[in-house]
Image (tube, grey):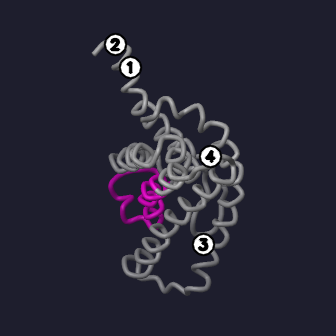
Amino acid sequence: MNKKQIRLNATPYILCALFAALIAAGAYIKIPLPLVPVTLQLQFALLAGVLLGPNKGALSALIYALAGLAGIPVFAGGGGIQYVISPTFGYIAGFIAGAFTAGRIIKRSAAKGTAACFAALLAGTLAVYAVGLVYLYLIKRFSLGQEVGLRAFFLSALLIPLAADLVKNAVFAALAARMLPLTGKYVV
């Protein structure tokens, strides 16, 4: 193998590390809402899936999660192994499933335009919310011993943040549709 082949083979993993860094940077762009902080982490995690494919997108989110659990303050609330018992850790774990889902949807889609990217981002968002909401409910109810009214829970933990995420997804879908042709030659 010559040096050029080695560099090209390393490119997808360099992109994984870059997206892990983008997910971390997205943690510090916060829109304060009750219960769950709204950041750009989700969109960067899903964008990793769309642009890098399901496996490398999920790897980017996994690198991000492991960096935070190792103590690097990349999460919206800091970092460290204790973050596993944080009510919002389920969303971080969900980034892995969301990136994989978004990547899988766009990979199987015949069209690669804005609408297809939005559909992939929406599916990824729903995967993240599925993991995050269940984890949030279980931690609040059983670990913290808090009474959780389902109506208030779904309003504050699903409907309000989901509305913001749909708007952000629309912007990121347009961005992804423009970037997708550029990443195809680097991602295997």
Q: Residue at x 72, y 57 (%)?
A: 167
Label 3 vs label 1, nearer the camera? 1
Kind of element beneath mark 1: helix
* Residue 84 quadrant: bottom left
Residue 3 numbered mark, or none: 2
Query: Which sits in the foreground, 151 or 78?
Result: 151
Task: Please state which amino acid type lies under the numbered disc 1.
Answer: Arg
Disc 2 crowd, CA 10 A, few/some/many (<14, 14-19, 20+): few
Decide which of tag 3 and tag 1 comes sooner along the chain: 1
Residue at which label 4 appears: 112
User: Toward the viewer: 177 or 77?
Assistant: 177
Tell me how far mark 1 sits from mark 4, CA to CA: 27 Å
Residue in view at x 71 percent, y 49 percent: 171
The residue that mark 1 highlights is 7
Residue type at the position of mark 3: Leu
In depth, the one of 125 and 1 nearer the eye is 1
- The amino acid type of the residue labelled 4 equals Lys
187 over 176 or under it: above or below: above
Q: Nearer the viewer, residue 112 or 145?
A: 112
Give the mark, 4 or 2, whose residue is nearer the N terminus.
2
Point out residue 6 in the picture as x, y percentages from the top left corner: 33, 20
Q: Are marks 1 and 2 in contact (CB under 8 Å)?
A: yes
Q: Residue at x 41, y 74 (%)?
A: 139
Where, by quadrant of the figure, is residue 145 drawn? bottom left
- Magenta range is 77-100
Q: Position of residue 186 (x, y in %)?
A: 47, 29
Label 2 element class: helix
> Which numbered disc, 3 or 4, marks the residue that appears first in the sequence?
4
Residue hosting label 3? 158
SS under mark 3: helix
Instruction: Identify the mark nearer the N-term, 1 or 4.
Output: 1
